[in-house]
């Protein structure tokens, strides 16, 4: 049953990304978009296979919708806004391709691919050390959640969101649409808002988290914030 759900969710995700990019671009002849989809699909498969083999409870948690009935209204609104911005971002980059704006040079496209690979590598590191990295913000008392402070969590408090910044920067470069970097600007305030909301939930309900925030000062970017 879980394998069927994984396959269906992966297929739907792939098709949604393709539907956002190619119709807006007005062509299927977009090598950079195919390269992005291949890279995204491969990275997602690596994460999924690792969770399937090593932490199925985490896989089950991450397969759940980020919008839950018991979710705080503030977090629900932030997630909804992020989903809308994410979809608009890909459609916008497709339109940028159609309108023929400035195209990123080959070295920038290669840099974008490297940033995406690095983002997936960071996400894998996060999943390896944090079995509680669910898609929704809550304290998982039923799984006896504990504070995670090792690995990337020893550097920043929210390494999964930090890796998302790499993905947001790398994707428009790989697609050859540098104007798509506006997505990073648009999504950053939402990531910051979710970071602050998540910390409020964890400080209130997870013993030891407040002390952890005193030891690890930075949330997303070491030396910055």
Image (cartoon, rainbow, N blue to C red):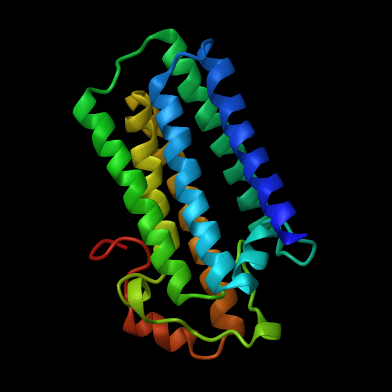
Residue 58 % position (x, y) = 60, 70
Quadrant in which the N terminus is drawn? bottom right
- Total numbered badges shown on the rendered structure: 0
Residue in view at x 63 percent, y 32 percent:
15
Percent coordinates x, y for residue 14 in the rendering: 59, 37
The answer to which quarter of the image holds residue 139 is bottom right
- Is there any visible trace of residue 158 in the rendered image? no
Q: Residue at x 47, y 68 (%)?
A: 127
Q: Is residue 42 left or right of residue 79?
A: left
**Seen in the image, is 95 located left or right of residue 170?**
right
Given the current orientation, which residue lies at the most extreme left position? 107
Using the image as rendered, state which of residue 64 and residue 48 is in the foreground: 48
Position of residue 37 relative to residue 116, above or below, is above
Residue shown at the point (37%, 52%) measured from the top left: 119
Res. 123 image quadrant: bottom left
Q: Position of residue 3 (x, y in %)?
A: 70, 57
Q: Is residue 195 left or right of residue 118?
A: right
Residue 130 in the image: above or below residue 100 = below
Q: Quadrant of the C terminus?
A: bottom left
Q: Residue at x 45, y 49 (%)?
A: 43
Q: Position of residue 164 (x, y in %)?
A: 42, 51
| Camera sees residue 171 | yes
């Amino acid at each position: 049953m879980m394998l069927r759900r994984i396959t269906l969710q992966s297929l739907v995700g792939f098709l949604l990304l393709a539907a956002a990019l190619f119709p807006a671009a007005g062509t299927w002849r977009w090598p950079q978009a195919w390269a992005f989809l291949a890279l995204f699909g491969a990275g997602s498969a690596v994460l999924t296979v690792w969770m399937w083999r090593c932490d199925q409870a985490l896989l089950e948690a991450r397969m759940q919708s980020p919008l839950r009935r018991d979710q705080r209204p503030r977090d629900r609104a932030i997630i909804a806004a992020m989903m809308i911005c994410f979809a608009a971002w890909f459609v916008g980059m497709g339109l940028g391709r159609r309108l023929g704006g400035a195209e990123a040079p080959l070295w920038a496209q290669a840099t974008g691919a490297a940033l995406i690979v690095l983002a997936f590598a960071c996400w894998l590191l996060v999943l390896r050390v944090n079995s509680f990295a669910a898609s929704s913000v809550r304290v998982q008392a039923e799984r006896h959640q504990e504070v995670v402070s090792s690995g990337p969590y020893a550097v920043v408090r929210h390494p999964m969101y930090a890796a998302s910044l790499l993905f947001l920067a790398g994707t428009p470069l790989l697609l050859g649409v540098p104007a798509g970097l506006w997505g990073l600007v648009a999504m950053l305030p939402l990531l910051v808002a979710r970071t602050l909301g998540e910390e409020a939930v964890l400080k209130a309900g997870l013993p030891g988290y407040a002390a952890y925030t005193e030891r690890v000062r930075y949330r997303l970017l070491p030396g910055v914030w």
